[in-house]
Each structure stands twice: as structure tokens, then as C-alpha cells.
Amino acid sequence: MSKDDSISSEDAFTCHRKNLSALSIEMRDGEKEKNQKSAQRCAVGFTILYTILFLPFFYMGLLSSMVFDNPRMTVPIGLSIIFLALLISLSMPVSIYLIWSRYLRGEYKKMRIFCTLPIFTFIGVSLITEVLGALLRYFVPI
């Protein structure tokens, strides 16, 4: 193999590598655009959902003061239940803010995590409320 053949094969290899990198950049741009559109649909959907659900959950928190109708209810446990019920509705505007701030920064994975924040809050509050109810039944006699 002569020196000229090795130079042309290196040039061909370099050219092929540049073409592959340009193709992968185009694929990444297309993939990024697709990911952005998917994230935008997700953000809009959850924003609409949480906007609609905010008022019912807020009223649920306000009406949770009726837990004091139970003769066994103590003040600390009753206030804890009220606070936890209001926490669900308060997590929705916070989640909407975090969703859109992460979307505008281009942090789509974090944005999707914040889409589930009120759902996890609801699950956590439900579990804690059940534990508080069990403690109330166990420790406070009629």
C-alpha cells in the first residue's frame, strides 16, 4: 500500500465519520423535537386536569373540619387531618408551576416527575389519614 492510498482511505474514513456525526445530530434534533412535543402535550394535559380538580379538592379540605363531629376526635389529630386534606389541593398549583418551569428549561424528565406530584400527595395523605384514624380508634376510648 502506497502513501497515497493510506491518505485517501483516511480521508474517506474522516468523511464517513463526519457524515455519521451529522446524521446523528439530525436524528437527535428530530428526537428532541418529538420529545418536546410529547412533553408539551403532557404538561398541557396535566395543567388542565389539575385546574379542574383544584376546586373539588380544595372544598374537600375545607369541609374536612367536620371531622370534629366525631366524639373521639382530638384536636391535634383533627387539625392534622384538615392540614393533610388541604395539602392535596395546595400541591396542584405548585405542581403546575414546577411543570411549566421545568418545561421552559428543557428538563423534560423532571417535568414528568412533577406531573405526578399531586397523585403521590393524594396517595400519601390517604395512607397517613388511615394511620391517624387507626391510632384514634386504638388510643382514644369512647
Image: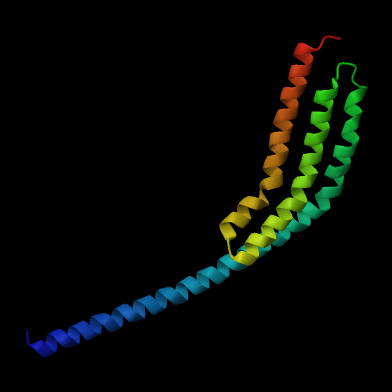
Residue at 71% x, 23% y: name it: 131
Residue 81 at x, y percent in the picture: 80, 30
In this orientation, does residue 84 appear?
yes
Q: Nearer the viewer, residue 19 or 100?
A: 100
Residue lying farthest left?
A: 1
Quarter that holds the C terminus:
top right
Tag count in the figure?
0
Residue lying farthest front?
A: 76
Instruction: Determine the image quadrant of residue 37.
Output: bottom right
Residue at 57% x, 68% y: name it: 34
Q: Nearer the viewer, residue 89 or 56?
A: 89
Q: Nearer the viewer, residue 77 or 129?
A: 77
Q: In this image, 118 relative to 25: left or right? A: right
Residue 69 at x, y percent in the picture: 93, 23
The vertical placement of 19 against 119, above or below, is below
The vertical placement of 55 against 37, above or below, is above
Residue 67 at x, y percent in the picture: 88, 26
Residue lying farthest top?
A: 141
Residue at 81% x, 54% y: name it: 51
Instruction: Determine the image quadrant of residue 134.
Output: top right
The vertical placement of 7 against 53, above or below, is below
What colouring style does the render use? rainbow
In this orientation, does residue 46 appear?
no
Quarter that holds the N terminus:
bottom left
Residue at 51% x, 73% y: name it: 30
The vertical placement of 53 against 140, above or below, is below
Residue lying farthest bottom?
A: 4
Residue 43 at x, y percent in the picture: 68, 60
